[in-house]
Amino acid sequence: MAKRKLEIAVISDVHLGTYGCHAKELNQYLKSIQPDILVLNGDIIDIWQFSKRYWPDSHMKIVQRITKMITQGTQVYYLTGNHDEMLRRFSDFHLNNFQLLNKLILEHDGKKMWFFHGDVFDITMKHSKWLAKLGGAGYDLLILLNRFVNFISQRVLRRGKISLSKKIKDSVKHAIKFINDFEQTAIDLALEEGYDMVLCGHIHQPCDRTIESDGKTVRYLNSGDWIENLSALEYYDGDWHLIKYADTVIDAQEEEEEFQALPAMQFLYEDIIRHSGNGQWAYQPGA
């Protein structure tokens, strides 16, 4: 299969290690592209809810796929998020064309691009982390319930899929306000710092919009997630494109590949395993 050549690809909020992760679809997507740069913009591995009892082959294949892209010359930047914040203690670690960072600034085609996950804007993350973790567990349960509802909807009622979490977010005014405030904060900071573009994840809300203020222009982009939206950002032909898996034609054969991790990827994965007690990751302040 001919791969689509991209200058930059961005994915975020994959949440490997949770039931809601669409790892098979993500693997197919990654197999269909050949980016010069791949930005993993946070929450790739869900360490908050990581369990040794749930790590299916499809999730390992994502690690394998990214490893293969690294060995084939793709520059990979892994930017930490809140669900994989444990990796922040390894920030600035790099090996060959793999680098672990908290944020990334790229100058490309004469434009200054600012990449970061976005949890720094979340007041719940700063002051009530236990509440955020409780919400994360509840979200995972909601996704499980959603799968059951969709099974009934498709197989029994012969109707299409529905997203319970999207319906909740779209109907709760506080959730809508949080998303709007998040986007506006990112835009205001980008304007203040003189960036042409700001690229985030965190809120699972794919977006591409341009704002003008006081003679300055900034473009806000959010890569969405691989739980509900199955979306990514792609840069080619001098412009950014927001894509969704459902809208792309991906014809890729499943292939059996032997897992051969780079030392960097293996090191990070094994460290997560070592620090998961009783099947669950326990947050340790200052670790």
Image: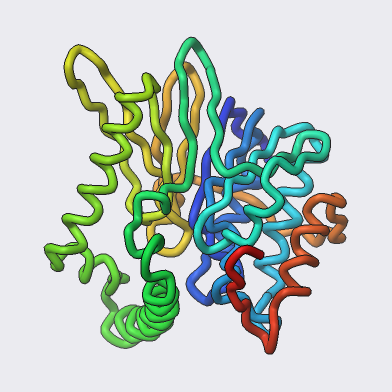
Q: Quadrant of the C terminus?
A: bottom right
- Image quarter for residue 192? top left
Picture residue at 46% right of the left edge, 25% below the top: 113
Picture residue at 62% right of the left edge, 77% below the top: 281
Q: Is residue 103 above or below residue 253?
A: above
| Front residue of this view, candidates 131 and 197 | 131
Picture residue at 63% right of the left edge, 53% below the top: 88
Q: Position of residue 284 (x, y in %)?
A: 61, 72
Q: Position of residue 14 (x, y in %)?
A: 53, 59
In the displayed structure, does residue 159 sit left or right of residue 92?
left
| Front residue of this view, candidates 251 and 128 | 128
Q: Position of residue 254 (x, y in %)?
A: 70, 59
Q: Is residue 46 above or below residue 6?
A: below
In the displayed structure, does residue 92 sit left or right of residue 32?
right
Picture residue at 27% right of the left edge, 32% below the top: 188
In the displayed structure, does residue 252 sit left or right of residue 144?
right
Q: Quadrant of the N terminus?
A: top right
Whether residue 121 can be seen here: yes
Whether residue 155 can be seen here: no
Q: Is residue 36 above or below residue 261?
A: above
Q: Position of residue 65 (x, y in %)?
A: 72, 52
- Image quarter for residue 186? top left
| Front residue of this view, candidates 114 and 35 | 114
| Front residue of this view, candidates 266 and 34 | 266
